[in-house]
Amino acid sequence: MTKDRYELFDKLCMRDVRLSEHSSYGIGGYADYFAMPATIEQLVTILEVSATYGMDRVVFGMGSNMLFPDRPKRGTLYISLKKMADVTVNGSRWFVTSGLPLSMLSVAGMITGAPEFQFTYLMPGSLGAGIYMNAKYYNEQVGDKIETVSYIDLDDPTLSLQTIRAEDCRFGYKQSIFQHNPWIIVGAKIKVPEFEGPISGGIGGLLSKYKAANGQLSSLDSFYSFFSRELRELQAGRTGIPAPMQDIERYRTQNKHFIYRSCGSFFKNNYAAGSSIGALVDRLGLKGLSHGGAIISPYHGNMILNADHATAAHILYLKDTVSEAIHRHYGFIPEPEVVIMEEA
């Protein structure tokens, strides 16, 4: 490995970074090492060099579905892909890198007349995370909207770029093949209707605004402000806001999704139970229960909020409270949707 690659690694790898600044929960202690590659090439360099150092690595997107530990494991390298946010347009097919916010696809679709991703409006996560967990809203899910996924297999010594078809990704309810393999999603190809207008320019302007914000949209209020503002500007330019996107904004604001820091729904629904987790929590009278700085949302029973400088321990206490109550009354243990990182 060349000296240049080690020098690039040293340049990209930051020290003593607060993970709370890269999580929609606003929770997490100091990581010994932290990197935000902007390209696939930079990511490969980081992976190669960190492997030679024998470093443990955690790869994530915007941190919108992660509960970071109060005391991260020493020596671990945390890698955020949120700066890998680009769209390459080739006719009716786009290649989208994994750090692009899912909400960006909904707004880009307004510019180009592509309705496929309207359901992703105000989803806080990135495309890569959306593929990893097959993010959904009502009856629409990310796995149904893509053609192929590009990824890097950490077990492959060459770290070469590989591609898998969507039909081979084992997409299910918040499930995918990526949850069972050491693969890092770096992008996906999606098909959209042909558009005769200036696609690249319109999307490019949107991306420029996002990158000018330095990708710092982990805070839910800043995330909401950015995308709702972009929507209003398009509306002012006489681009009609599709009804599904209006409905999403109405639902999420009514349920106070962006007032407090959170990771959205904490548990996956168990449809065999006959009701959503939120409904079960409501029946159990747990909405509004607090512990330390954390609280079960009074508006949505499946959200555990960071209301006042909560720690990971506060969130996990309420998570265990909900799990135990549901198990006792309904006979099953709900599966967390949020990725819970281990303490040191």
Image (tube, helix red, strand yellow):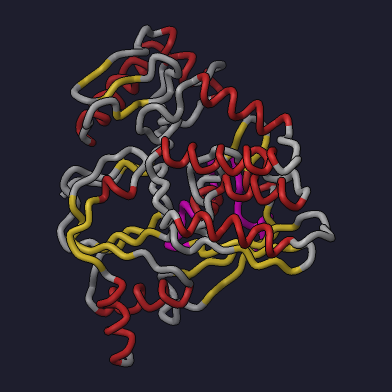
Q: Nearer the viewer, residue 237 or 327?
A: 237
Q: Residue sitting at 21 percent across and 34 percent down?
A: 311
Among the 4 quarters of the image, the one containing residue 163: bottom right
**Where is residue 225 drawn, in percent x and y?**
48, 38
User: Any magenta on residue 169?
Assistant: yes
**Where is residue 342 drawn, in percent x and y?**
24, 46
Q: 341 above or below 100?
A: above
Q: Is residue 48 visible?
A: yes
User: Any magenta on residue 84?
Assistant: no
**Where is residue 189 drawn, in percent x and y?**
66, 62
Q: Is residue 177 visible?
A: no
Among the 4 quarters of the image, the one containing residue 294: top left
Q: How many marks?
A: 0
Q: Residue sitting at 43 percent across and 11 percent down?
A: 282
> On the picture, is 141 further left or further right than 252?
right
Q: Nearer the viewer, residue 6 or 11?
A: 11
Q: Residue sitting at 27 percent across and 62 percent down?
A: 34
> On the picture, is 198 further left or further right than 257?
right
Q: Nearer the viewer, residue 302 or 171?
A: 302
Pick out the residue farthest to the front: 236
Check the picture and name the quadrant holding the N terminus.
bottom left
Q: Residue sitting at 54 percent across and 60 percent down?
A: 208
**Where is residue 169 drawn, in percent x and y?**
60, 55
Point out the stretch of residues depicted in magenta: 165-184
Q: 25 above or below 32?
A: above
